[in-house]
Each structure stands twice: as C-alpha cells, then as structure tokens.
Image: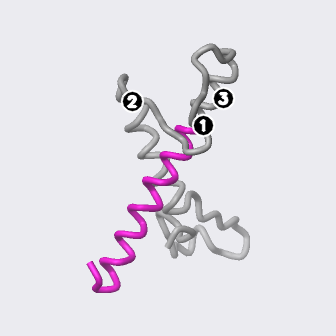
Amino acid sequence: MENEPAFPTDSAAQVGPQTWHYEGLTKLEYFAGLAMQGMLADPDFIPRHPDHAGLPSTAEPNELSRRFREALAWNAAAIAKALLAALEKESNGKG
C-alpha cells in the first residue's frame, strides 16, 4: 500500500503513446507530508528520534538543526506508515 499512487489516474490524456505518465506522490509520501505539515503547525511540537537520545543542549546550532530535520522526517514517516498499516488492516477485515 505504501508505494501505491496517492492520486491514481487512468485518463487517456495522461497515458497515451505521446504523453508522459507520472504517478506523482505515493500514499506514503502524501501522508508523511500531511503529518509533517501538522507537526510544523504546532509551535510546541518537539520531534523525537530514537537515535538522538542524549543530545547535549550545548550542541552547535547546525547540529541541532540537522537533528531536528531528521527527527521531523522520521516522525512524519512513522505516522504515515502507522496510518497505512491501520488502513491495510481495516481493508482486510481485521480492523
């Protein structure tokens, strides 16, 4: 389900012999983007990443910024994967 297109199309105008066919975002990418948007909209959100435990508060600003971006992306992907897993479970009648 993760690699399925978020907005599939079968339009002849988009899949003809003289046109390019581009699926666009996958469901995982789309849901991760929505999760990231929501996290960034919350001024009190502090992303956590399991590999970043114990980061000293005296770390260089560039290191803090890099780790913030990594943690934000990791959290967004984790949320998207959890949503897709729940949707998959529900569609299989196990939800």
Judge by depth and name the residue closer to the eye, 65 or 52. 52
In the image, residue 25 sits, relative to residue 38, either above or below, namely: below
Q: Main secondary structure of the magenta part?
A: helix
Give the number of the mark in front: 1 or 2. Answer: 1
Judge by depth and name the residue closer to the eye, 5 or 61. 61
Q: Tag 2's secondary structure?
A: loop
- Magenta residue span: 70-95
Residue 51 lies within the magenta run: no
Q: Say which amino acid is labelled 2.
A: Phe
Question: Which label belongs to residue 45?
Answer: 2
Q: Say which amino acid is labelled 1.
A: His
Q: Say which amino acid is labelled 3.
A: Arg
In the image, residue 14 sits, relative to residue 77, either above or below, namely: below
Residue placed under numbered mark 1 in the picture: 52
Q: Residue 78 vs residue 87: left or right?
A: right
Give the number of the mark in front: 1 or 3. Answer: 1
Q: Tag 3's secondary structure?
A: helix
* Disc 3/disc 2 C-alpha distance (Å): 16 Å
Which residue shows up at 42% across the image and 45% down it?
A: 35
Residue placed under numbered mark 3 in the picture: 66
